[in-house]
Every structure is written in structure tokens, then in C-alpha cells.
């Protein structure tokens, strides 16, 4: 039997949500072959087989705002999937928690959904790295971050396909926004672009001043922060010397201190045998900031099992107490389990 785990990065796709994805241009989300099948029964079976005590589930990319302009659909989908997850948690309180999805870039609708989702006992919210090209850290999202800050919220950030507007950031979020995957004929966005979009978003959170303005938010980053560790010193350094931009200045020491106080990083994906070293050995993030993640069902159950074995082999280089922190201890503390 594998080591006991708490899964902070796994997903759910109710049938109505899956149908909405397919009907609105996401039959192959982020370039993947298909929308995966999901059921409560299959999820619990995967958990039981891999000794996962509890899963904090979330909606993955592309979220609920499926196309620019479909604001009403986004608000309706957010309410329905969050109610679905709330019911799942109510029926299986020891097995499931959930991050509520928000209908961003719709700010007013998102504020309304925060109110309802927290009333239904969500465990935090899930945001995409960008919402139709509006990246987290954009001042248009400040009202949402202010509300999350007021609630001391946990914010799980999941990558999505990078986006930009040729007309500039003011046009982001409109139908002029373009999805970017320069190698899409060879590989879907999750292979590489997800990592880069996470790093882009982290840079924007820091350099926009969002991290400082809202000190009560706890962030959970997917895939050990993607490509953030090797570029951290670069974007912080440029932020201190480049002229003509409105940038919040950070020393690398202060930024890493914040990463070790207000950020967590999950192990979903190919984080072993090497990626973890860049975060922990490379920039000095502590083992007490690491969380287990399966990425089920976008990672099929058989692959989750294989990753679990590779992870167990990789953590043999860790102290036992650090492995226990990553697999369940940190999540127990974070979610008061």
C-alpha cells in the first residue's frame, strides 16, 4: 500500500460541465486529445487504491468562462459546479474538499460567487493563471483579490494556455485575445506552456504589487511553480533596474521569504526525479511548503499510480519527516484536517 496522502490537486468534471466544454470550443482543452471522463465512483476508487485520504478537488483549465463574452454562461456554470462540489463535500466530508471556481474575468459575478461559495463551506478558490489574457496581478482583478484577502482565502492557481491581445493588455479579455502555443502542432499546452504561463503569472503577481497589497492570501501553485524557480532572480532583478514601468521592487531574499510564508507548491506531474531540486535546492523553498497532487483525471488513474511509485522512489533522498510533510502533514495543517 502506498504512503498515506492528501491530494490538493485533482479535478472533477460533472457531466453538464463536460458537455458545456464540448459545446463551447473545448472538446480538446488546451490541445489535449479529449475531455476526460470523471465520476465520483472512479475518483473514490483511485483514492482508495493509492491510499489518498482526502482530495481537495477543483475545476481545471479552461475554467468556466469558456469564451470571451459568454458572461452569463460563466456565472451559471460556476454556480452549478460549485454547488455540485459542495454537495459532494457534504456527502463525503472526510474524503472531499473543494476550491470554488470563479467566473473571471467577470469581476461582479466573481464577487457574488465568492459570497455564495464561502457560505457553502468551500476550502478556497481556484483561479487560472490568466483569464482570456488578463493575468492575475492585473488591477482589474483587484476587487476580487481584496475580497479574498479579507477572507484570508486559500487560492489554488492552475495554469491554462497563454493568451495575449495584439492591441495590448487593455484589450485582453475581449474577442481580440489570442491563445498562444507556438508548438501546438507538436505538443499540447500542458507539456510546456503551462509551466511558462505559471512563471509569467508569478512574475506579474510580484511586480504588480499584488503580493504586497493583499498579504492575507495563501497561494497554492501547480507543478512546483512551473518554470518559476530558474527565472525568479531574473524577473526580480529586472524589476529593480528597468526604467519606464510601474513595477514593485523586490529583493530576491524578500521574495523567497514570502514564498516560504504564503505560497505552497504541489507535486503534480513529472516533478521527480529532477524538477523538485530547482525549487528546494535551487531557491531554498522549504519542505513545509510542498503538497501532494495527482492531477486526476487529466492524469489517468494508471498514470497517477505510476507517478506515485516514481515519487516514492524520488523521496527516498528526503528525510522521512519531509516526505510526510509533503504527502499529508502540510495539507493537514493548511486545511485544519
Image (spheres, helix red, strand yellow):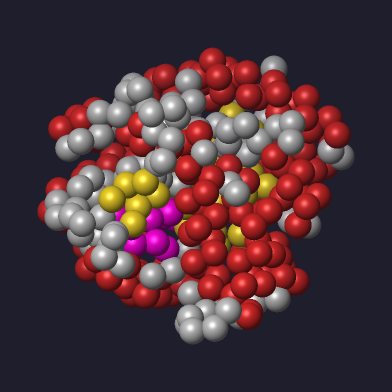
Q: Main secondary structure of the magenta part?
A: strand
For residue 259, what is the image quadrant?
Answer: bottom right
Residue at image location 76% in from the left, 44% down from the top: 277
Quarter-of-image position of residue 189? top left
| Count of labels in the image | 0
Question: Residues in magenta?
Answer: 124-136
| Residue 255 in the image, given as x and y percentages of width and height | 67, 69
Residue 133, magenta (yes or no): yes
| Residue 324 in view of the camera | no
Residue 208 x/y as whole percent: 48, 75
The reply, left or right, for residue 315 in relation to residue 263 is right
Q: Does 246 sit above or below residue 296? A: below
- Residue drawn at the location 44% of the way across and 68% of the way down: 137
Residue at 56% across, 23% down: 304
| Position above or below: 271 against 227 | above
Q: Quadrant of the N terminus?
A: top right
Q: Nearer the viewer, residue 127 or 38?
A: 127
Seen at 64% across and 57% down, the residue is 231
Q: Is residue 69 visible?
A: yes
**Residue 224 left/right relative to 105:** right
Q: Is residue 249 above or below residue 98?
A: below
Question: Where in the figure is residue 160, as x and y percent of width and height?
Answer: 40, 45
User: In the rendered image, which quarter is residue 40 located in?
Assistant: top left
User: Within the magenta stretch, is there residue 172?
Assistant: no
Amino acid at each position: 500500500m502506498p504512503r498515506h496522502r492528501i491530494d490538493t490537486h485533482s479535478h472533477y468534471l460533472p457531466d453538464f460541465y463536460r458537455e458545456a466544454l464540448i459545446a463551447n470550443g473545448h472538446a480538446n482543452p488546451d490541445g489535449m486529445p479529449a475531455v476526460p471522463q470523471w465520476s465520483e465512483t472512479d475518483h473514490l476508487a483511485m483514492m482508495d487504491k493509492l491510499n489518498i485520504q482526502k482530495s481537495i478537488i477543483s475545476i481545471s483549465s479552461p475554467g468556466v468562462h469558456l469564451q470571451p463574452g459568454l458572461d452569463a454562461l460563466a456565472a451559471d456554470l460556476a454556480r452549478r459546479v460549485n454547488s455540485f462540489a459542495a454537495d459532494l463535500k457534504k456527502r463525503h466530508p472526510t474524503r472531499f474538499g473543494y476550491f470554488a471556481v470563479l467566473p473571471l474575468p467577470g469581476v461582479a459575478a466573481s464577487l457574488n460567487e465568492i459570497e455564495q461559495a464561502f457560505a457553502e463551506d468551500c476550502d478556497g478558490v481556484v483561479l487560472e493563471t490568466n483569464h482570456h489574457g488578463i493575468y492575475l496581478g492585473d488591477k482589474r482583478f483587484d476587487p476580487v483579490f481584496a475580497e479574498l484577502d479579507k477572507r484570508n482565502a486559500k487560492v489554488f492557481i492552475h495554469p491554462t494556455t497563454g493568451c495575449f491581445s495584439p492591441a495590448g493588455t487593455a484589450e485582453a479579455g475581449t474577442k481580440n485575445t489570442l491563445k498562444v502555443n507556438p508548438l501546438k502542432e507538436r505538443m499540447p499546452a500542458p507539456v510546456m506552456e503551462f509551466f511558462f504561463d505559471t512563471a509569467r503569472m508569478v512574475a506579474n503577481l510580484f511586480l504588480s504589487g499584488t503580493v504586497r497589497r493583499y498579504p492575507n492570501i495563501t497561494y497554492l501553485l501547480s507543478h512546483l511553480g512551473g518554470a518559476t524557480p530558474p527565472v525568479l532572480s531574473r524577473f526580480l532583478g529586472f524589476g529593480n533596474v528597468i526604467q519606464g514601468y510601474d513595477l514593485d521592487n523586490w529583493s530576491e531574499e524578500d521574495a523567497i521569504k514570502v514564498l516560504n510564508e504564503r505560497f505552497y507548491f504541489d507535486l503534480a506531474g513529472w516533478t521527480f526525479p529532477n524538477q523538485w531540486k530547482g525549487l528546494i535546492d535551487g531557491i531554498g523553498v522549504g519542505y513545509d511548503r510542498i503538497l501532494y497532487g495527482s492531477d486526476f483525471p487529466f492524469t489517468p488513474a494508471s498514470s497517477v499510480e505510476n507517478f506515485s511509485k516514481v515519487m516514492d522512489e524520488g523521496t527516498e533522498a528526503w528525510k522521512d519527516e519531509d516526505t510526510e510533510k509533503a504527502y499529508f502533514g502540510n495539507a493537514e495543517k493548511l486545511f485544519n484536517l
